[in-house]
Image (cartoon, rainbow, N blue to C red):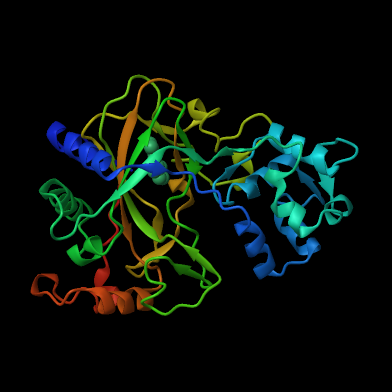
Amino acid sequence: MAEIPDFLSEEECRVVVQLAQLKGLTESQAVRPGSQEETADLLELTPEEMFNLLDLNQDGQLQLQEVLANSRTWDGMWLTPESLQGIYAGLQADPDRSGQMSLEEFKHLSNRELWHLPMQPGGRRPQGVRNSRHTWLYQGEGAHHVLRALRKRVTRLTQLPPLLVDLSEPMQVVRYEQGGHHHSHHDSGPFHHKAACSHTRLAARVSSLTETFCRYITVLFYLNSVEEGRETTFPVADNRTYNEEALIQENVDLLDTRKSCDKGNLKVKPTQGTAIFWYNHLSDGKGWVGDLDEYSLHGDCVLTRGTKWIANNWINIDPDYQRQARYQKLVSPQREDYGDSGERNPDQHRGFHQDL
Ligand SMILES: O=C(O)CCC(=O)C(=O)O
Ligand SMILES: [Fe+2]
C-alpha cells in the first residue's frame, strides 16, 4: 500500500463531492434475496460436499465461525455470532445448543433453508456488509475537467498504459454518514478459470456461471478529513502468513469493522486530498495479473460522528490475457495516442507491477 499526500487539492475534493451530490447518491447495500440460492442450484453440490467445504478445519463439525467465514462471501449480508445463533434456534439446527453442527444436523436443513439463513425467523435481519451511499462519475471525454485530470494523474501514478485506465470503471464516490461502515472485503474477486470478469464478459463472449469484478488496482481518495477513528483498515497487512481460519475466532472477528477495527495491522487515517493505492492481485510471474492477493483485505471502520467522503478508482484487468486483449480490441477507440497496448504480448507488460 502506498500513501500519497496532496494527490488532490482541496478545491478538487470539493468539486468531486459536489458533482456526486449533483448526480445523486444511492444506497450501497446490495442484498439480493435469492441470489445465493441460485448459486447453490448451479453449483449442484451434495450436502456432504457442501459440509466438507464449509468445514475449514476438517474436524467433522461446523463451528459458528466456519459458517460465518463462509457467509462473508454472500452478497451484501453480514452475520454475527449472535444473529447466527438466533437463526439456528429458529431452524432448530442445533438442538443441543453446542454452537456447532454435525453433518447429520446439517443434512436436516434443506438447501433453501440454508441459503436463506439470514432471513430465517429468530434471526434479526442482519446488518449489511456496508452502510453507505454512493454514485458513479464518468471520467471520459466530455467529463468535468477535474475528473479528467484525476484520471490522467491515476495513469501516471500506476504507470499503466492510458488505455487500460480509460477502459476501467468510472469513479465511485462514497459517502458514509454517522454509523456508516464497510466491513472488510476484497475489492476484486478470486479469479479461477470458470469465473468471468464483469468488464470483459460480454465483449470476450465468455459464458460463465459466476462473474466477479477484476480490479487489479485500487486508488482510493480521501475527499474530506475526519476526526479520530474512521480509518481504512487492512487487518492482515504484513502478516507473515495468511490464515483464513484465524480471521474469525470465537471472540474476535477481524473482518467486522464495527467491532475489531483496533485489531487491524495497518490503519490509514483519512486526510483530505490524500490518495492511497494498492494491488489487489499478485503478479503471475510473467508480467501479467495473477491471483488475488489475500493481504489486500481491507475495510472502513465505523463512523461515530460526522460524514466521511471517499472515492475509488479501480483499474480493471482480466487475469486472462486473451480475454482482456479481445475486450480491448472490441471496445477501444482507434486512437493514435493509445499505441497498440491492447495487442501486445503479455511478456511486454513486464514491469506493470511495482513494489510498494
Ligand atoms: O471507506 C474506506 O475507507 C474503504 C472503502 C472501500 O474499501 C471500498 O469502497 O471498497
Ligand atoms: Fe474496498
Residue 197 position within the rendered picture, expressed as x and y whole percent measured from the top left: 43, 67
Q: Residue at x 79, y 40 (%)?
A: 88
Does residue 178 appear left or right of residue 158 in this picture? right
Does residue 47 appear left or right of residue 299 in this picture? right
Q: Residue at x 32, y 68 (%)?
A: 287
**Up/down of 110 relative to 248, above or below:** below
Residue 131 position within the rendered picture, expressed as x and y whole percent measured from the top left: 47, 36
**Up/down of 306 relative to 42, above or below:** above
Residue 20 position within the rendered picture, expressed as x and y whole percent measured from the top left: 26, 42
Q: Residue at x 76, y 36 (%)?
A: 122
Front residue of 94 and 14: 14
Image-quadrant location for residue 325: bottom left
**Up/down of 206 relative to 105, above or below:** below
Front residue of 295 and 308: 308
Image quarter where the N terminus lies is: top left
Front residue of 334 and 62: 334
Ligand 1 resides in the quarter of the picture at top left
Task: Residue 66: tell me if it is visible.
Answer: no
